[in-house]
Image: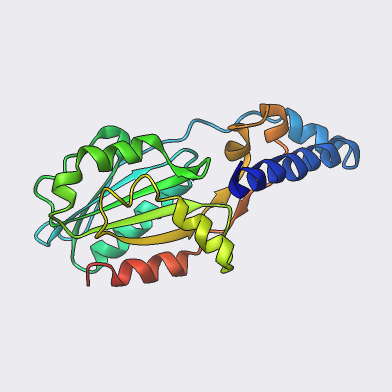
Amino acid sequence: MSAKSVSRRSFLKAGCIGVAAVGVTACGGAGLVAALRPDPPPVDFPSFSYGDQTGDKVLIAYGSATGSTVDIAAAIGKTLGERGFSVDVHPVKEKPSVDGYQAVLVGSAVQGGNWLPEAVDFVRSNQSDLNRLPVALFSVHFFFRGNSVNSQKMRLAYLDKVRPLVPQAATVFFAGRFDQRTTAVGLPHWLARLTPTMDYRDWNKIHAWAQTIFA
């Protein structure tokens, strides 16, 4: 059993279930109201276009489970568009073609210590083309956000299924958001409803990275 899985399980049990218990017992009516509130609406996975259509074309293909990665992909696309690129942002579930693009970014949320399967499949199915283009990979995660040796090692492990496919790709890690949708993946929905939103996305870091990639 990896330290990663232990940490995730410990967090969910000690944190989220603890929050639920405190919310219902200590917070009284407020906790009960939170437990009874409706589930959030389904996550939308839209496409976007940015920039001057005469500029070099960049594809951003993203995999998202709860919506956090959607916002990051859009923010990167907007910044690249402001730099003069012609940017298309598409969910990997649509299996966008890489034909006609001069560079490709692929990003994924991290669940269970790995990229989402559909994001890995996108890289694998386009491996030959991606290895002929400038490519960058961005991972969106909630755990192991620190600068310790262990945190850095665990973050690198998120790419174990992807890095061998595109070894020349630039890589970056962005902290994500933890909320009701995230905990609903592994907990009953009535417990997930008590989870507070913890958003660690650093928009300055995201913007700064998008200002330098493909310089």
Specify whether 11 is left or right of 137.
right
Q: Residue at x 15, y 56 (%)?
A: 133
Examine the image and state in which quarter residue 172 appears.
bottom left
Q: As displayed, is residue 75 above or below residue 36?
A: below
Q: Residue at x 64, y 48 (%)?
A: 197
**Number of numbered discs visible in the structure rendering:** 0
Q: Which is more toward the observer, 20 or 110? A: 110
Q: Which is more toward the observer, 108 or 81? A: 108
Residue 43 pos. (x, y %): 46, 35
What scheme was used to colour the molecule? rainbow
Examine the image and state in which quarter residue 128 appears.
top left
Residue 199 pos. (x, y %): 58, 55
Specify whether 48 is left or right of 199.
left
Q: Residue at x 64, y 44 (%)?
A: 8
Specify whether 132 is left or right of 49.
left
Residue 47 pos. (x, y %): 29, 42
- Looking at the figure, which quarter contains the C terminus? bottom left
Q: Residue furthest front?
A: 1
Residue 38 pos. (x, y %): 65, 28
- Looking at the figure, which quarter contains the N terminus? top right
Q: Residue at x 31, y 64 (%)?
A: 79
Q: Which is more toward the observer, 86 or 127? A: 127
